[in-house]
Structures are given as C-alpha cells and as structure tokens.
Amino acid sequence: MKKIRCLLLAIGLGTGMVLAATLGTEEMAQAGPDSAKREHVVEESAHDSLMRAYDSSKSGTDRLKILNKLVVLHQQEDSTFLYYQDLLLKEAVAQQNLSYQSWAIYCYIAYYHNVFNLVQVEVWMDRMERLAKRNNYYEDYFLSKRLLINSYISQRQIECAIMAAEDMAALARSRNDSVGMCAAALCLANGYLETMRYDEGSVQLERASRLLPSSLPVVDMVNTWTKIVSLYERLHMPDKYLEALERLRELRGQLKAQSPLLKDAITALDLFIESGEALYYLRTDDLKKADGHLQVASEYALSTPYPQYLAQYYQVYAMYCQRTKDYEKALEYVDKAIDMASRFSAADVVGCKALKADILSRMGRPADALPVYKQALQEKDSLYRALSLLQMEQIYDLYEIDKLALEKEKQQARISHVTLSIGVAALLLLIGFVLRLYRDRRRLLVNQQEAERLSEVAEEANRLKGIFLANMSYGIRIPLNNVVGFSQLLATEEGLSDDERKEYSSIVQNNSAELIQLVNDVLDLSRLEAGMMKFQLNDMRADECSADWVSLVRMRSEGSIDLKADIQVGDAVIHGDIGRLTQAVLRMVLFPGRSGNLQRTVSLKLVYNPDKNCLEGEITNSPLADEAFASQKTAVYHKINQLLFEHFGGSYQVCGPEGDKIHVIRFVYPTLLPPSPANT
C-alpha cells in the first residue's frame, strides 16, 4: 500500500528547526488578491470533492486514502489538520490497518516536533514503540525515533539524544535495517557536533552517507541529504559539501516531478541549494559564480516563508556584499539575517552578530563595531557555559537513574538472598542444631574476611580517585582561567586593537573547546571504568579500516605528521566499535594538542598473526608517548585506549626508548576466527 509521504516535508530540511506552518497575510498580499483568491477556490474545491468522495465511500482502504489526502491538503492549518488526523487514526484503528496506524502516529510526532512540544512527541513515540513491538512493524518507527532525538537536541538534552541514538542504532543493526542505521548515524553525528566532538561526528556522518539506501522514497532522501549538507557545512568539508549539494539538486528534480503540489517546500529547497552553492563559491573566492547563485536565490526568497532558509540566504548575501565592499547593503542584509535567526537559533544569531561587527570594522566604524563584538562574545560564552552545565546535569541525571535501577536490583537480590537463607536455615534445623551452628560460624567468618577485603579495595579506590581529581582540577583550572581572564579583558578593556581582540577571542574559543573536549574525555573514561559505555558493534575488514586510518591521519594532520605505514593484514576481519577504534588510533598518531610548526615522522606497523588470531600493531615515534607532551590529557588518552582495547580482548602498552626506536606504543586487537574447513 503506497501512502502519500509528502506530509510535513520540511521536517528534514535545513537544521531541523521549526518551520512556519502557514503563509502569512503579508506574503499573500504580495502575490496579489486575485492570486490568493484563486488558491483559496482551488483548495476549497479540492476539499469539497474529497468530502463528497469520503461520504460516498464504503468502509475500507478507500476511506483511509481519502482521509490521508485531507490531512495533506490541510497540513498548514493546525486545527483542521489535527481534526482530520484524528479521524484518520480512529478509522485505521477501527479497520485494524497497521500501516495507516503507524503512518498516522508518525504524522502526530512530526507535527509536535515542528511546534517544539517535546512532551507530546514522547507520548506519541511511546505509542509508536508499543505498536511496533506488538506487531513487529517498523516501517515508520526509525523516522519517528529520529524526530524524537532531534527534539531532544533542539531542547539541548544532548546526552539523552546520544543515548537514544545509540539504542536506535543497536535495534536497527539487530533488524539489519539500513534506514534505521542511517538515521541513527545522522542523529549521533548531530549530537557529537553539538558537543564539539568533531572527530566522532565526522565518522558517523561518513557512515550515514554510506548506509543511505537508494530505495528510500524521494521525500525521505531529500530530508536525509539536507541534513548531510548542513553537517558537512558545520564540519568545514567543502568538497563533500558541494557533492552533497549536487546530490540534493538531483533529488529536488525528482521531488518536483513526483509531488508538484509541494510548492512551498520545493521553493524552500531551491533557496537552500542556491544559497549553499553561493556560500561554497564565496569560500573558494569565485565571486562571479557566487553572484549568479545569489541572483537565482533572490527569486526564491520572495516566496519562501521559512525563517531559517531566509536567515541563511541573508547571511550569505551579506558576506557577498562584504567581499564586494558594498558595506551598506551588507549591513542591511545582516540585520535581516539576525531578525530571522532570532526566531529559531541563538547560536546562529551569535554568528550573524559577529559578521555584522566585522562589516562595521571594515567600514571604518570601530566605535559601532566594538559593542556588537562584545555582545556576540558574551552571548557565545553564555551558550558555551549553558551547554557545558546542561550536559553535566544530564550526565548526572542519567547516572542517578542507573544508580536507582542498580539499587533496586541489589534490593531484590538481598530479598532473594534472605529468602534463600531462611530456607537453608530451616533445612539445617532438620539436620541438626550443631551442624547449623558450625556452618553459620564459618559463613560469618568468610563474610567478615570478604568485608575486610572489600573495605581495603574501597579505600584504595578512594585514594586513587582523590589523586585523579586533584590532577584533573589543575587541567580544568588552566583553560577555565584563560576563558574567564581573556573574556574579562575583552569586556572591560576599551583600548584594545582589532588584532588584540581577535587574538583574545581566539584564545577564549580554543580554551573553551579544550575544556569541553576534556569534559567529554573524562566522561568517556568514567563510562569505560564503570562498564556503562555503549558501543556500536560491527564487523569490518582490517585492510579497509587501516586504509581509512591512514587517509584520516594524512587529512587531519595537515602536513604535520609524515606517516610511514606498513600494513600486512591480509583478509583479517575485526569486530567492535569501529568509530571509537579509529579515534584511538588517531590519538596515538596525531599530536595531542595544537602542533604549531612541529613536524614529525611516525611509523605505523600493523600485522595479522593467524596463529593467535589477532592484529599486532606498533607505532614508533608516537607524539602521545613522547614525554615532551606528557600531561593529564595524554594520561587520560592512554587510559581510555587501554580500557577500550582490553574491553574487546586486546592489550595496549606504552614502551620506553629502544635503540633507535623511541616512543613506541604496542597494541593487540583480536580478529574473528576464520571459518573451519568443515563448514567451508
């Protein structure tokens, strides 16, 4: 049964923020009274025709199809849309039509996601989960889960979003559902980028683009590729960004051919594509091509009611005017971008204000640019602080939930133990009082010894924890003092030059990113030590993994690392979390911080040992093992790597200088057993 999947197309476009539900009266007035009247007459005629067909139809799928068309027809009218949506769900339940029940629930989730009602999104998602599990029907489940996770991200509940995405990925893998795995990877990439974990985010984004099935409906393909375009832009990967825009342009043509009635959504998509390509050519210094795309985009902007697309268009146009030194026009467009961005994203407002300050500075108006710079920096610092505090609170809340669940299990275990003890005591009474007394004394002695041993272990753990926290407090205090100190200088010192302000702003930004990365690393370390880390397990050929490692090192080192790779892995296959394993290898090869002008030759040797069924790796001249870079940060990296390899049955060892081989890291990672001759 083919459903009309054009409903709420705009959910997947752009950044996923809320879109305007209806075209305002001002836009209608611009189109002219005759045009508005014609559209109203056409819509009224279509509605009357569908209602006559509904009244004359018999109970069955025909009624469901008509109701679905009415839902699509009135999707821009909240009350009417919800009325027909409710009728559709009731009719589907009455007919026990599983496909339309799932679709109707998905539409509810999409609607409440677009109006930022997280409570209702969770309520309807719970109903979707019960329907999917009860009937083993997951056609709309993963797309609905993606909307829930995007709602978490829009509400800044990043840790909840990441955990939900990891659960979705595990379920999708168990069902071998490529749509679900792709959606989960996109959600993880979005969550990681929100917390500035760019390495993990880029790995998940590459995985999503590989997993995207070609059989997906064109509407869902447009939604997914729009998200991929936005994420590539945030990662500053221009080649991938342009390729994704070209793919989106191809899909736009297919969408227009299949669903010509989606005029607003297609126009918004056109504006998004043209603005995106103009941005690409601006960044590659091709102003002529950028101007051509902006001229095309300006035509679509006249009929686009969606603020985030208009904000992107105005911001790109302001950047173009700045490059062409038309500063007055640049100010006009950046003010429009700030007005549009204020409706959906505080972070985008900060970026637009920074652009405005830069324009004022280039105009020779430093007195006007300075307060705008200050305001943008203050808002940016507030966003960083709010994000860090909110993430820590979410981690703590999740920890408390797990702790309560563990306490409940312990309580049940204690109750079971007491019940068993009573039964044993009753049995021992039958055997004899003397034998029971002997065994009770023996048990008490064993328990006392075990309690003493556990007490010693706990005291040692507390001592080590105190040492670790003392060291970490120093590592956190340095970047935090830099952020606070230079922020105060920027806010209070009025005689600073533009170069000094840029330098101080760069210091604040770099230390903020370093602080957030340190918090993320400590959280990962805590999860690994507590056994609470959730992994995304996959099987992959070792030669493909090692090829990815080599290419990623050469790309991200930006020439500071000369990697000599000796890979002899044959056809070995490994099992584990490939993303985290990749991150561990990159940490062992790249500099642990900003490399500056440093250059280093690093050797990577990876050999498959079929006798032991493992990969044996050796990294020579590793910056991570070099004592010159020793810090609490590198100690945390070593501990994370050690726990990660040991979790999957391998080993990790840092060795001192050996002859002409200095700073050596050796690791072992198990491979899957080859098939037996009998099975082959």
Image (spheres, rainbow, N blue to C red):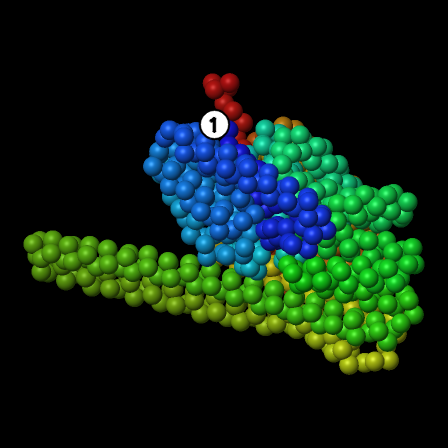
Q: Residue at x 62, y 52 (%)?
A: 20
Q: Is residue 263 left or right of residue 326?
A: left
Res 192 seen here: no
Residue 186 image point, x, y percent: 60, 45
Neighbourhood count class around disc 1 (C-alpha, 10 Å): few under 14, some 14–19, many 20 upward: few
- Disc 1 marks a residue whose amino acid type is Met
* Residue 34 position (above or below residue 472): above
Residue at x 79%, y 61% (from the top left corner): 334
Q: Position of residue 524 (x, y in %)?
A: 56, 56
Q: Nearer the viewer, residue 671 or 291?
A: 291
Q: Is residue 44 above or below residue 622?
A: above
**Above-or-below relation of 212 to 294:** above
Tag 1 residue: 1
Query: What residue sits 37% from the left and 41% below the top?
Result: 90
Q: Could you tell me if residue 73 is visible in this image?
A: yes
In the drawing, does residue 127 fall left or right of residue 662?
left
Q: Secondary structure at mark 1?
A: loop
Taking the image as shown, residue 331 lies to the left or right of residue 158, namely right
Identify whether 670 is placed above or below 469. above
Coordinates of residue 94 in the picture (x, y in percent): 34, 37
Question: Is 499 in front, or is 310?
Answer: 310
The residue sitting at 89% across, 62% down in the picture is 327
Whole-percent x, y for residue 629 in the image: 73, 61
Q: How many marks?
A: 1
